[in-house]
Amino acid sequence: MPRRYLGGVFGNTIGSDIDKSDVTGVFSLSQQNYMISEGGWAGLDNYFGDGSDGSLSTTGNNTFTVQNKNGSYDGDMVVKQYTALTVNAGHTITPDQPCRGMIIYVKGDCVVNGKISMTARGAAADPTVAGGSDNAAVPTAGIQYGIKMTGGTDTLSMAGGVPFSGCGNAAKNAVSNQISGTGSNYTVHTIPRSNNNGANRPVVSNNDVKEDPADIRGGNAQYGTSACGGGGAGGQAYEQTDGQGGAGGNSTCFTGGSGGGGAAGGGAAPSGHRGSNASSNGGIGGQGGGHYESSSRPKGTGGAGNPGGADGSPGTNGNNDAGDGTGGLLFLIVRGNLTIGSSGSIQANGTRGGDSSANTDNSSMGGGSGGGHVMIMCGGQINGGSISAGNYVGQAGNAISNPDVWGVREYMIQAWGGRGGKNNHNAACPQQDLYTGTSLTRQGGAGGKGLISIYTGNLL
């Protein structure tokens, strides 16, 4: 029906195509009920922010300051509320350190030719313990966001932002504006609080047997069970038991899991050659094993995490370069159309395990950290409808780069884990895809892929 202009009780004049949530306070309750129920309102029930951050077209990188920082790897969820957003080519918007997530509202259109990133920004935080500026634990059900859309039968109260407890006061205050649901045309997006998807320590049949890379990759996310990928385990060194890499860490609602440490080689390896397990809840990556049998030989390297794990000691050839960071949590809530260009990416990737400069030997390298979680809610179309609603494991949309020798590449929307650490010995670490390779290896395990959840096309 045609757009109409209606005067409110406070002298406001607004069009009938604004969102229904914006009617409150402008018209009396009887006017609100009449104008919505009689079909004259063309807007949406869902909340797309208040536009308090204005319109942003980037002129360079934008780094958002995390509030309520708790050390270098934790802090409140970042909240931004734009009227329109354009991230231009070559620019990245991201928090200034790991935190409990980032939620970006856009009341108009969003264009991404650069990057919106929660790569390496997952929080090192236990969601079962009170934290954030709201001093609360994440609810047992996990972080939940209700969406008014056709066909859904879920029920959730968004009052007070309680489903975002543990994320900080700014996030709770923002999401409290989202409409609640009582079982009709309402869907609840759930991010489980804790998961069990870190890779176990490698297990081989005898000394000098390398590991199947599939056995030490972190677990991929799966909707309803996990949203972020598990950490990869450290690789297998020479000795069957005392050459085991450390286990990868489990993911949480805030982060992909950290990577386990690689082991040092040697045929008479003591237990100190083993790589250490990754810390839980997106904490420090596992430390590499030391080469106690011969300090002039290569050590195991560290796994990715917050921070990356140290290489072992004693030993040689470690670079101490395990990635700092795990994949984080990202919400993008867009009222208009979302356009992702050929160089644009919305991402929450993990980081790689530590590399070694060794050209020979039988030591192993650390695991990569798991990918994070991206949730997109779009009232318009995404790339003209070519990217549709659904749950995607790891990536959605087109690839925007070519793969390197390990298969690492970028996609328009992505939540990959980091690759495992490697050395320069092609027999020990044959070049292969981090997720599909099958050659036995001493390389660390890749972090698991995170989940990408897209809601578009049937929002109310």
Image (cartoon, helix red, strand yellow):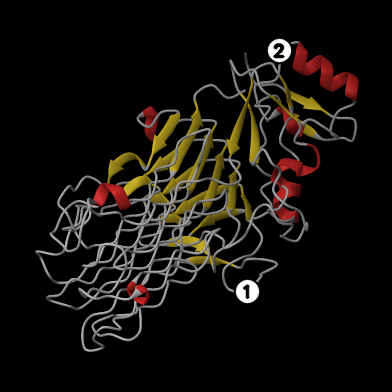
Instruction: Give the residue type that dot 1 points to.
Output: Gly
Quarter of the image containing the N terminus?
A: top right
Q: Is residue 304 above or below residue 395?
A: below
Q: Is residue 237 above or below residue 340?
A: below
Q: Which residue: 62% across, 54% down? A: 80
Q: Nearer the viewer, residue 204 or 301?
A: 204
- Answer left or right for 43 relative to 37: left
Give the percent coordinates (x, y) of residue 348.
Answer: 44, 53
Q: Nearer the viewer, residue 215 or 96?
A: 215
Instruction: Give the residue type that dot 2 points to.
Output: Gly
Quarter of the image containing the C terminus?
A: top right
Q: Count up the numbered dots.
A: 2
Quadrant of res 388: top left
- Answer left or right for 12 relative to 456: right
Q: Nearer the viewer, mark 1 or mark 2?
A: 1
Give the percent coordinates (x, y) of residue 443.
Answer: 24, 62
Q: Is residue 400 visible?
A: no
Residue behind mark 1: 71
Quadrant of res 399: top left
Q: Is residue 272 above or below residue 332?
A: below
Q: Is residue 183 above or below residue 307?
A: above
Q: Which residue: 46% across, 63% down? A: 278
Give the percent coordinates (x, y) of residue 180.
Answer: 74, 29
Residue behind mark 2: 39
Regarding mark 2 in the picture, which secondary structure is present there? loop
Q: Is residue 239 visible?
A: yes
Query: Which badge, 1 or 2, comes first in the chain's sequence?
Result: 2
Neighbor class of circle 1 (other Cα within 10 Å; few <14, some 14-19, many 20+) is few
Q: Which residue: 10% across, 65% down? A: 426
Q: CA distance from mark 1 to mark 2?
A: 52 Å
